[in-house]
Amino acid sequence: MRKTVTLDPDTEALIRQMMREHGWTFKQAVNTAIRQSSTAQGESRSTIFPTYDMGLPLMPLDQALRLAADDEDQQRLRTLRARQLARRVARKPNDLPR
């Protein structure tokens, strides 16, 4: 397949260097560079991460979203109550709830 490609000066220099070192044609050097590049990228993508057994869950995971929502609701209530108390204290410093 015939295609027109515009190379940056640095990539052209790399291709010309490959041509000199290996005695390749321009076409051979470009094709080899593309093949080597795609192989190198494919190898770096296959990263293996370790896995660990975390044991049995401490709460029912089928209710995880509900539990998270409940926890968020409780945190919001604590924040609102703290703000209300701060407003009362700012208005009447002697009338604190006991």
Image: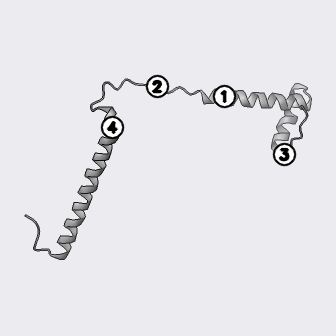
- Label 3: state its secondary structure: helix
Q: Which residue is mark 2?
A: 50
Left/right placement of residue 34 relative to residue 69 reads: right
Closer to the chain start, of discs 4 and 1, is: 1
Q: Are marks 4 and 1 in contact (CB under 8 Å)?
A: no
Question: In the rendered view, does 1 fall on the left or right side of 33?
Answer: right
Marker disc for residue 64: 4
Q: Amino acid at mark 3?
A: Pro
**Near-viewer residue (30 or 18):** 30
For marks 2 and 3 on the same chain, the one whose residue lies earlier in the sequence: 3
Mark 3, other Cα within 10 Å: few <14 / some 14–19 / many ≥20 = few
Q: Position of residue 24 (x, y in %)?
A: 90, 27
Label 3: which residue? 9
**Secondary element type, mark 2:** loop
Residue 8 visible at all: yes
* Amino acid type, label 4: Ala
